[in-house]
């Protein structure tokens, strides 16, 4: 018979809880998705961050992003369903962002990385 210590059992429970929370971060409830008007009101002409760099989507259709090791700029458009897509100046790389409410804040789906990222207003 194997005896598991209470501390070992707690550690397993914590890891399972963290894993479960991380797994929940791979999907979003469509009812939390921001509309085009909500994206404009929340993220246009305001700086925001995903934790590393700073985004600014200007009202004139231009955008910029910068972090300590990378920067990008170009243009963006917001589709009727609220999806915001950028096209980088120079290389023409296209990236689309879909924004969602997340508790008291926001997060976004980044199509090229296939991940959700936090979106924190500055």
Image (cartoon, rainbow, N blue to C red):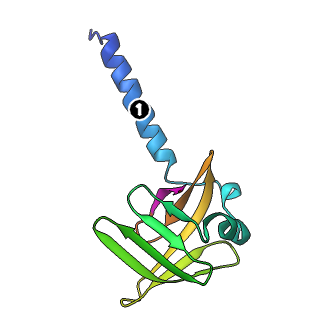
Q: How many numbered marks have been drawn onto this rendered protein structure? A: 1
Kind of element beneath mark 1: helix
Seen in the picture, residue 54 relative to 88 is either above or below; the reply is above
Q: Which residues are magenta?
A: 115-121
| 83 magenta-colored | no
Q: Residue at x 50, y 78 (%)?
A: 63
- Secondary structure mostly seen in magenta is strand
Seen in the picture, residue 22 relative to 51 is either above or below; the reply is above
Residue nearest the viewer, comparing 80 with 1: 80
Is residue 118 shown left or right of residue 37?
Answer: left
Q: Position of residue 28 (x, y in %)?
A: 59, 54
Q: Position of residue 76 (x, y in %)?
A: 55, 82
Residue wearing tag 1:
16
Is residue 3 shown left or right of residue 60?
Answer: left
Q: Position of residue 49 (x, y in %)?
A: 47, 59
Seen in the picture, residue 35 relative to 93 is either above or below; the reply is above
Residue nearest the viewer, comparing 3 with 13: 13
Q: Residue at x 30, y 18 (%)?
A: 8
């Amino acid at each position: 018979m194997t005896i598991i210590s209470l501390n070992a059992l707690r550690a397993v429970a914590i890891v399972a809880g963290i894993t479960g929370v991380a797994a929940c971060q791979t999907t979003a409830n469509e009812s939390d998705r921001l509309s085009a008007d909500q994206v404009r009101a929340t993220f246009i002409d305001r700086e925001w961050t995903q934790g590393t760099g700073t985004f600014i989507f200007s009202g004139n259709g231009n955008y910029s992003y910068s972090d300590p090791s990378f920067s990008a700029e170009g243009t963006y458009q917001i589709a009727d369903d609220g999806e915001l897509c950028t096209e980088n100046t120079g290389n023409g790389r296209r990236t689309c962002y879909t924004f969602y409410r997340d508790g008291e804040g926001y997060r976004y789906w980044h199509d090229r990385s296939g991940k959700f990222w936090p979106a924190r207003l500055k």
